[in-house]
Image (cartoon, grey):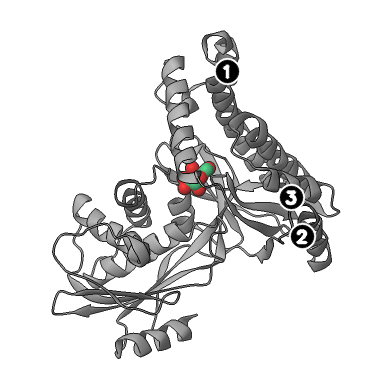
Amino acid sequence: MKAAILSKFRNVFGRQPEIVARAPGRIEFIGNHTDYNGGTVLGAAIDRGVWVAYASRADGQRRFASDQRGEIISVPAAAIQRQEGPARWTNYPLGILASLPESGLRGPAGFDYLAMSDLPAGAGLSSSAAIELASALAFLGAVGSEPERETVVKLGRHAENHFVGVPCGILDQGVSGFGRENHLVFIDCRGPRFTTVPMPAGAHFWIFNTHTKHALVDGFYAQRHRECAEAARALGVPLLADVSPDALAAAADRLNPVAFKRARHVVEEIARVAAAVTALRQDDLAAVGRLLTASHRSSQTLFENSTPELDLLVDVLTGTAHVHGARLTGGGFGGAVMALTSAEFGDAQARGVAEAYAARFGARPDVLHARTGDGAALVAI
Ligand code: GLA
């Protein structure tokens, strides 16, 4: 990828880049919709991501290009406006530029900017967080700052919440920023505090991307966010993470049935994250797998953010040899399922899963055997 982005930058802009930055995509391992509820979550950075190459310009023009689209998009240095149409993807780097002064940081004026990705598109692996973090590192590097990881992570989330307009939590940016090869990232979202937990040897990740996406996915995400806030209000706490399972059970009669289901998913999911950390530390992958599958069943029945496509994949995977557990990964309402497997699970098993899916839904899911990788960083050139 490094050689490819250097040569593409020279082809597009006719000059050398001064800075190259890279940020990985992520898997949500367990902790579904817990982040914006003040809970905990485990994720893994993968060895694929978004690369950004950058060189300053003296004329104040901001020129963006990507490997996905041929044209150069020029954005005047004046007010930073949200882009629509083919330029929409530039809202991620533009969101970072807009977030820098809002976070008390300085950003560059004019530049040439190229983004390249080796993340499968639309697979729920959070290419948006990856482009945000790689852009933030490049822009801060351009003005000579060496930010803390946490600063870059928060800039990414700020851009996503306030410029792109998605009310996401800290999971995607936190994992892309703090990822470490052969480790999971544990986030206590309230701090937020970031640590890593070693991945037991012999654990493998497989991603099955359905390429399905509910037309209203963004609206549903925001709706779940609202429902959780309403449930917390009805329970008299600032965030659902403040409710114990016992307190929730005692309040069952006071909550409307939907609020109760959403709250129960979040409260029990936070307990599953803690149980998963314990099981990981004991190298008990079978127990971890059971927690992953239980998380999916809770998404299916309580949080109602699964789909028939995701459910079928989980059903088939959990009936397949060498699979410890499987669940939807990310926001839900379409997207991908991840499976935790032993090394014996291979292409033959993955093909069997894809065929069972195709027999029911026609199309085949994309299959990716993902490896863990390191978090966002500048790349030496
Ligand atoms: C999306 C959001 C995250 C998180 C997950 C669900 O990936 O971007 O912040 O809320 O959904 O756990």
> Dot 3, crowdedness within 10 Å: few (<14), some or many (≥20)?
many
Q: Position of residue 120 (x, y in %)?
A: 56, 66
Q: Which residue is nearer to you in this view: 132 or 365?
A: 365
Mark with earlier residue (1, 3): 1
Q: Is mark 3 within 8 Å of ligand 1?
A: no
Q: Position of residue 345 (x, y in %)?
A: 81, 61
Determine if residue 261 is in view: yes
The amino acid at mark 2 is: Ala
Write down the residue under mark 1. Answer: 257
Mark with earlier residue (1, 2): 1
Mark with earlier residue (3, 2): 3
Q: Which residue is nearer to you in this view: 22 or 150?
A: 22
Residue name at image x 75 percent, y 46 percent = 312
The amino acid at mark 1 is: Pro
Q: Which residue is nearer to you in this view: 328 or 47?
A: 328
Write down the residue under mark 3. Answer: 313
Compute the Cα span from label 3 to label 2: 8 Å
Q: Position of residue 326 (x, y in %)?
A: 71, 47
Left or right? Give the position of 309 relative to 34: right
Among the 4 quarters of the image, the one containing residue 148: bottom left
Q: Position of residue 116 (x, y in %)?
A: 44, 74
Compute the Cα span from label 1 to label 2: 36 Å
Q: Secondary structure at mark 1?
A: helix
